[in-house]
Amino acid sequence: MAAPTRYPDHVERLTKAIVSGDLASGTRLPPQRDYADAHGLALSTVTRIYAELARRGLAVGEVGRGTFVRSPAVGAAAAFAQWAPAPGGLGGVDLAFNYPVLPGQTEAFRQALRETASGGDLSTLLSHAPHDGHPSDRRAAAQWLSRRDGVDVSPDALVVCAGGQHALDVLQLALCRAGEPVAVEALTYPGWKALAAMRDIPLAAVPMTADGLDPSALDAICRAHAGRLRVVYTMPTLHNPLGSVMPLAQRLALVEVARRHDLLLVEDSAYGFLVADAPPPLRLLAPERTFEVCSLSKPAAPGLRIAYLTGPVGWLPRLHAAMRASVWSAAPLMAQLASRWLDDGTLDLWITRKRALARQRQAIAQACFAELGATGYAGAFHLLLPVPAPTRCDDVVATLQTQGIAVTPVDAFAAPGQAAPAAIRVALGSPASDIALEGALARVADVLRAAVRQ
């Protein structure tokens, strides 16, 4: 039988071989030129084949070493797919996701539901809300953001979304076009990558400094794209996964580049609440071109599914149209619960406590990972742990999975065509107790120290 000759045939043949185990995890795929010569393909076609395998989580490229087969289980972790803990081990400890829930939050939720049920007009919660949210919910969010930033935020410039990922979805619907590049940091949020891939939006990777996106590199990329690049997605305050906080001078330089090339800025503030003394958000430095997403998944709870999206007034009709095309409006019950916690100071109290918890857990992690080179922001719920050569990140992830511990290889965050550092991201926010966290971190440290001794 003749070998497959079309791009999809090669992708499906290799996928089947990897999933069945005929191509074992860790197997080095042929160099792209060798594969092209062997199958009579253009080199660009082989590049597409390997890229599609990587997108499916079935292969990973490593700088200077080549492209390796990745087991479907490890690929799922890298793609932020739902993770199922292996049997035995620690019974499943999640160090891949950050869902910090404080003691007492469940009871606060119960009490808020009681109060909602006993007062007010419940019929409004059974009806569609306006696309941008009920005016009372937008007022509560605007007042909270105004207190946070020390500058008034208009409720009319705000949209209530069904979580942070939905807000990003709305922004891509409103701002981006298929085939038109969007600039991102070389390491970026996998959720933004996934949305862009579904819409055929190419991502242009911008090199980073130690403090975040490099404005001079962005300027060069804009010139190279000759006006086709219009949108920049960035995480200036507590970058995920690096944990950097962009200083004011670098933010001002970024704004200058954005104005020079007429760029729209998308500022993802998912972890920004953990930085008490952060520089002003980009929204305050360039309000005419900045959209900011403030999700409540981390400061409140992931099940709340509420986020606030702010943007220039002139773009609001596009945002409202994107809301109508996606979920129509955020769930009124969830929005009202969020407003209650914004108004009565509950969310501010949780933020204070979660900042303290993050610092406490960082201290625990740094003690567990002594001499292993862990890096990260002292007040973040995640850190990076380097994997020493010749050990591969996938091997570390797979070994920990067999012990019931989930971590994320950093290449999950790599923008297309970018090489990620040989490291894993360790999330500290989800374990229910410090004891559970310490036990899991000790296992991670043991695996990495064994790798160092190889």
Image (cartoon, rainbow, N blue to C red):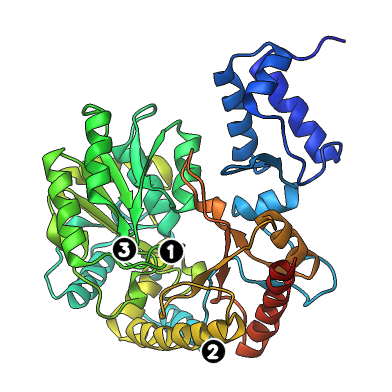
- Whether 234 is drawn above or below 343: the answer is above
Decide which of 430, 447 is in the foreground and name it: 447
Mark 1 or mark 3, earlier in chain: 3
- Amino acid at pointer 2: Pro
- Whether 201 is drawn above or below 286: the answer is above
The nearer-to-camera label among 2 and 1 is 1
Q: Secondary structure at mark 2?
A: loop
Label drawn at residue 242: 1
Say few, some or many: other residues with alpha carbon within 10 Å of mark 2 (under 14 / 14 to 19 / 20 or more). few
Q: Quarter of the image holding residue 160? A: bottom left
Q: Which residue is mark 2?
A: 103
Label drawn at residue 211: 3
| Residue displayed at 70% across by 84% down | 439
The nearer-to-camera label among 2 and 3 is 3
Task: Tell me the quadrant of the picture where the N terminus can be found.
Answer: top right
- Whether 169 is drawn above or below 387: the answer is above
Name the side, left or right, on which 351 lies relative to 241.
left
- Amino acid at pointer 1: Leu
Q: Is residue 120 visible?
A: no
Task: Tell me the quadrant of the picture where the C terminus can be found.
Answer: bottom right
